[in-house]
Image: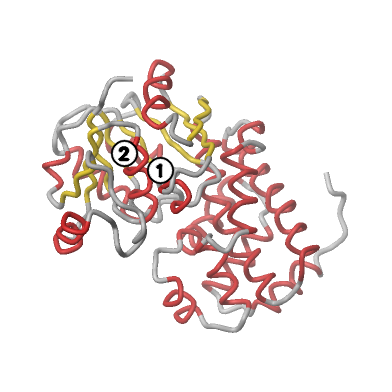
Amino acid sequence: MSTKRVTVFGAGSWGTALAIQLARRGHDVQLWARDPLNVERMQSERCNRRYLPDILFPDSLTPIDKLKNGLNADYWLIAVPSEAFGGLLGQLKKSDLRIPLMWATKGFDSGAGRLLHNVIHDELGKDYPYGIISGPTFAGEVARGLPTAMTLATNVQALQADLAALFHGDGMRIYTSDDVIGVELGGAVKNVLAIAAGISDGLGFGANARAALITRGLAEIMRLGKQLGAKPETLMGLAGLGDLVLTCTDDQSRNRRYGLALGQGRDLQQAKEEIGQVVEGATTAGVIMQVADRADVEMPICSVVYKILYEALTPKAAVEDLFSRSLKAEY
């Protein structure tokens, strides 16, 4: 496809990796970060030393620190933490521009427990053109150009091919979808379940317990997805099962590592300091129960993670809670 101008808002590991992929594909990419000193370092060192220190930026990637300088683009891509998503949309709204918007943020709006497409509806309007990209991905592997597959879902059919073509190639394969809710839900809830898997492994409970957590965790995602309007095939695909398996089983996942630290006896603050980055699953765990309650969906694994993080339940007591539940049929 022809060269496009894309602004990526958010220079964490994921935003930086996607910016590198877009630039590798030949696009003119601006990578926005809030901190001018961080941007200055990225400009001079031609890498993001904090998050991806060994990956040099392609020549067509330009770090910027002024939001207004990134507004003039063919496409916008948001990759900030979920708690900053609404605030950034509010700033973009002030421009009065109607630039097709993508996001790679995973989670819910932490205030009202909304899915992020609902935040877009409230801030920019229900007919605003948008798409979400998600799937089983670690930022470092994407930045290095290792083989990766993701799902891109849009609210406008005509937008799918254009957005997919931005990323597709150079080690990345994109599958398209119209199930925005399913892609959002899989990417959000899997982070909470990855914390659970990490806790289980940190306690030394082994592969059997991990497999059970992943499988029953998927059942929780499927139940919630049914109530919220997601397609089951999406939740069984890359953005659901694929991302869940990845984050629950590999220590590149900060959510899994956070759970490991808790299972090994570190307190919440020590575990956060060890990770040194935003742990999206911890934020999502604070919201997921209100979402589940509104949908009248039982999510026992997510519930015990919430209790560990917000009600001082110990990891061992959480496991006892799960395994002392009454007998039931699997389906």
> Closest to the observer: 23 or 75?
23
The residue identified by callout 2 is 77
The percent position of residue 148, horizontal first and vertical second, equals 52, 40
Q: In this picture, is 260 found above or below 222? A: below
Q: Earlier in the sequence, mark 2 or mark 1?
A: 2
Residue at (32% x, 65% y) in the render? 50
The percent position of residue 147, horizontal first and vertical second, equals 53, 40
Coloration mode? secondary structure
The residue lying furthest to the top in this view is 158
| Residues at marks 2 and 1 touching, judged by CB atoms closer than 8 Å | yes
For the N terminus, the quadrant is top left
Q: Is residue 139 left or right of residue 325?
A: left
Q: CA distance from mark 2 to mark 1?
A: 7 Å
The percent position of residue 317, horizontal first and vertical second, equals 70, 78
Q: Is residue 138 left or right of residue 18?
A: right
Residue at (58% x, 52% y) in the render? 190
> Closest to the observer: 2 or 206?
2
Q: In this picture, is 207 found above or below 78? A: below
Q: In this picture, is 34 found above or below 172? A: below
Q: Is residue 182 left or right of residue 131?
A: right
- Amino acid under disc 2: Leu
Q: Secondary structure at mark 2?
A: strand
- Amino acid under disc 1: Ala
Q: Is residue 150 left or right of residue 219?
A: left
Q: Secondary structure at mark 1?
A: loop
The residue identified by callout 1 is 104
Badge 1: residue crowd in 10 Å (few <14, some 14–19, many ≥20): many
The percent position of residue 270, horizontal first and vertical second, equals 46, 81
Residue at (49% x, 57% y) in the render? 284
